[in-house]
Structures are given as C-alpha cells and as structure tokens.
Image (tube, rainbow, N blue to C red):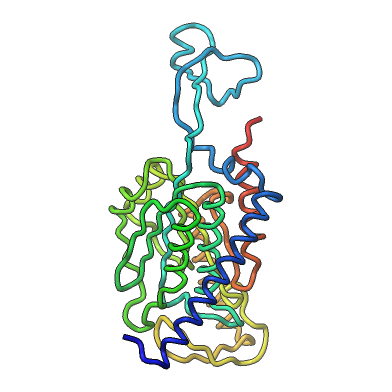
Amino acid sequence: MPTPEEKPSSQANLSATVAMLRRLEWRARLVVQSALGGEYKSSFRGKGMEFDQVVKYEFGDDVRDIDWNVTARLGEAYRKKFIEEREITLLLLFEDTPSLQFGSGSVTKRQALLELASLLMLLSAVNGDRISLLHATPQGYTLTKSATGRGRVMHTAANLLGHPAPPILEGQEAKIPWKYVLKAAPRHSIFVWLGDFPGRSQPDVWPVLRRQYQPVGFRISDPWELELPKSGSQPVYDPTTGELYTLNGGSSAQRSAHESWSQQRDKAFQNLFPKDSDRLSLTAGDDALEAVTNFFHQRMKRFARV
C-alpha cells in the first residue's frame, strides 16, 4: 500500500507515461499516413508470404519465383505463386540490462530504447498487426502474447514504460529463454531484438531462429560509445561494474582501447544481422521516428518487386 507521499508521485509518472504514448501514437499515425504509406507492410513481404500453387511463367513475372524442378520436369517455365499473409505478427524482445542505464547526455540509452520500442508497437497497432512483447532482465522475463488493437497495445507499451529498471549490481546479462522464443510466435513472424548489443557471440539457437522468423536488430548507443570526447577528463560511472572511472579523451591508450572495443561490438552486431536492412543503429538523443521511417524505406527497396 503506497504512502500518501508515494501516491502523487506514482500518479504523476502514470500521467507522464500516458502523455508520452499519446504523443508517440499521434506521430505514428501521421508518418504511416504520409511518409510510409504502404511501405511498412511491404518492407516485410520477403518471407511474410505463403506458398499457394505453381503456375505457368508469363512475361513480366519475377524470375526469382521460377520453380526450376517443375520447369525441368515439364519442359516449360513454371513459377511459384505466393499470397501475402493476412496479418503481421511482431515479436519484440526488449533486452533490459544495467548497461542501458548509462547516459552521457540528457537521455539514457534505456530511455531512448523504451521510446523506440513503444513507437514500434504503436506503428504496428496503427496497421492492425498482432504484437507479442518479451521483456527480459537479469532477474527473469515476462511475455505479453498477441496483443492487438489500440487499447491492448497501449496497455502493453505502458507496462513496459512503467517497469522499473533492473538493479545495477545484481547481474548484467538478461535471462532470455531462447528455446521458448522459438515457440512464442507463428512462423515467419517479425522478430525485433532491441538492446545495446555489447559485443558477444550469437545464441546457439540463432540459425534456427533465422529460419523460423524474420529477425531484425535495433541497437541503441550512447554518443560516447561511438566516439570519446576529444579532450578533458570526465568522471564516469560504469553501471555494469558499479565503479567510477576517469575518462580522458586525450589519452591515446584509452582511445585505442575504445576503438578496438567499438570494432568488436560492430562486428558482433553485423554477424547477427548481416544485411544492412535487417539492422538499425540509433544513438540516444536521435529522432527515433525519423530513424525508423528511413529503416522501413530501406527495407522496402530491398523487397520491392522489379
């Protein structure tokens, strides 16, 4: 039972969350109706198609759809006909780790990533898609399955925004139930993994997951993770160790170590998502909606039929 002092604060946080979601929803509707149009759905058509039947190839059909086995057997060109799935299911994995709580500016990585996740959910709600959210922390995970419709999606997003950040010193890696992830959504669903991707080997189930879903990675970074300040010393608190460090942008040793770490991190992220149109890197403080819009434009070009 909250004390009288806690209750107003809780209500203020709830009001701020609702106001943020309404603002994001308004922007999501605006961009879908103007900037994106039908590109949101077409950007996921590559695997979001179901095989229907084999038909004769006609001039102008996509040669990539030719069924070469049938063509060789019958002596004339046949192609596979696909029908677009009626709805899209998004499975969002929000990897909530203590490292997200770092911020060299006015916005932490966690705040920026929460806004991005909420925006993705609201974009999907505008398009009438189904959304499942797996929120993983070092303490465990929760799964909200198959939310659809404005009210349920808003509720799911509000719960994520209102969830307290994990304790800084009680574990660093989120407990992600990968085998359960493979059963959490229908085949060909879009799997969106949101985190800061510190640079590590891929999960053992990753090859299977890539066949099961359409994996997409959204990585959040702090400006200092991309480039150290060029001069001056800064006391920095590391949320992954609970220690204070002195960051010296003029130190060649620190800059060299930072560059090596950054290259390793980038390489690990690219190994998970080899195609540029399967990954998005966002910096805390960037306009999330603009970045997501550009991302969908890029994917649309990849899957556009010639």
**Does 258 appear above or below 79?**
below
Query: Is 108 placed left or right of 52 in the picture?
Result: right
Quarter of the image where the N terminus is located: bottom left
Relative image position of residue 107 (x, y in whole percent): 58, 78
Q: How many marks?
A: 0
Q: Residue at x 39, y 60 (%)?
A: 201
- Which residue sits at x=63%, y=36%? 304
The quarter of the image holding the C terminus is top right
The image quadrant that residue 26 belongs to is: bottom right
Image coords of residue 130 (percent x, y): 45, 48
Measuring 52% from the left and 20% from the top, which residue is drawn there? 66
Q: Residue furthest right?
A: 34
For this rendering, which residue is in front, 260 or 179? 179
| Spot occupied by residue 283 in the image (x, y as percentages of width and height) | 60, 69
Image coordinates of residue 151 in percent, x first then y, are: 47, 58
Identify which residue is drawn at 41% across, 89% down: 6
